[in-house]
Image (cartoon, grey):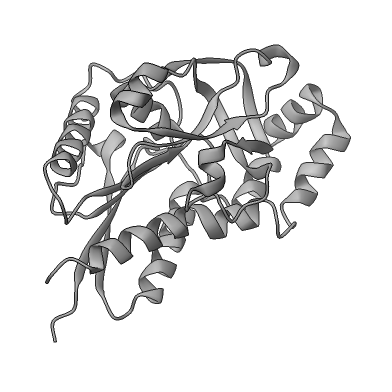
Amino acid sequence: MQKQKIKITTIDLYNNERNEGMRCIREIVTDAINLNSDLDISYDVFDTRYKGELPDLSYDIFISSGGPGSPFEDEDKKWDKDYFTLLDNIWTHNQNSNDNKKYMFFICHSFQMMARYFQFGEVNKRFINSFGVMPFQKTQDGTNDIILKELTDPFYAADIRHWQVTNANNARIKEIGAKILSWEIPEEDNRENPAITAIRISNEIVGTQFHPEADPESMLYHFKQDERKEFIIKRYNEEKYNEMIDWLQHPDKIQLTRKTVIPYFLKNAIEELSKVSV
């Protein structure tokens, strides 16, 4: 009997910058493939921002990575235009197809690109860079959503961003049927205007501002960098820095987020795709 074929791809937006995100994503995808050994699942990576590589619609599941810098800095470059063409093709395909949908997950930098495309909020510079293990508050929709419902409330995730998405465009959100799943827990400086940190556009398309792929090893890589350590201590204090280090080993914090968010996204996508006739 022929195995069901499913193609997964990661769109790498790190622009050739050293990172831990791609390793983490690859490990999560590999775990999903191993859990579904009865299916014929392939995995490819496209170096989009640095080499201009992009997958086509022959892929079924897309994971768009984090990355450095401004989500607007490459607006005039070919890869940026091609990226939005791909999003348009995926969205149009899903609107016109009852089955064999395309699934897509957006992370951090890609979340801001996602906001540019779907226009569900304002993409702007954060009042201060955010870095560390941070708590996030679920909405009611987030409490019931497959990617967040198994997490604590608040839940904890790696947060590394200079940019953000605020000022939710509620009319646009209602128009496309999207649901905000979580918000940042605001600090004093942004108490009146917290950032959106997770949104579901449809059953197939979802994104997070935080890094759900991060594991303790990847965060320790960042925490050990002098500039990052100094930033946290100056912004908060040394006690907070040490607390974040301790949180890395806590099973109900980023370890739970790592085991839940993207794995559940993949589980749902693979289950739905496996129902489609070979």
Which residue is found at the position 24% from the left and 68% from the top?
274
Which residue is rendered at x = 43% and y = 34% of the image? 179
- Residue 163 shows in the view: yes
| Along the viewing direction, whichever of 150 and 4 lies nearer the viewer | 150
Q: Is residue 17 above or below residue 144?
A: above
Q: Position of residue 116 (x, y in %)?
A: 33, 22
* Picture coordinates of residue 193, whole percent (x, y): 60, 15
The answer to whether residue 216 is seen in the rendering is no
- The percent position of residue 63, horizontal first and vertical second, equals 35, 48
Residue 38 drawn above or below residue 114: below
The answer to whether 192 appears left or right of 67 in the picture is right
Q: Residue 12: which quarter of the image?
A: top left
Please give left or right for residue 231 compared with residue 123 in the image. Answer: right
Would residue 74 be found to the left or right of residue 121 on screen? left
For image coordinates 67% across by 50% down, the residue present is 152
In this rendered view, identify the residue nearer to me: 117 or 172: 172
Residue 26, position as x, y percentages in the image: 41, 59
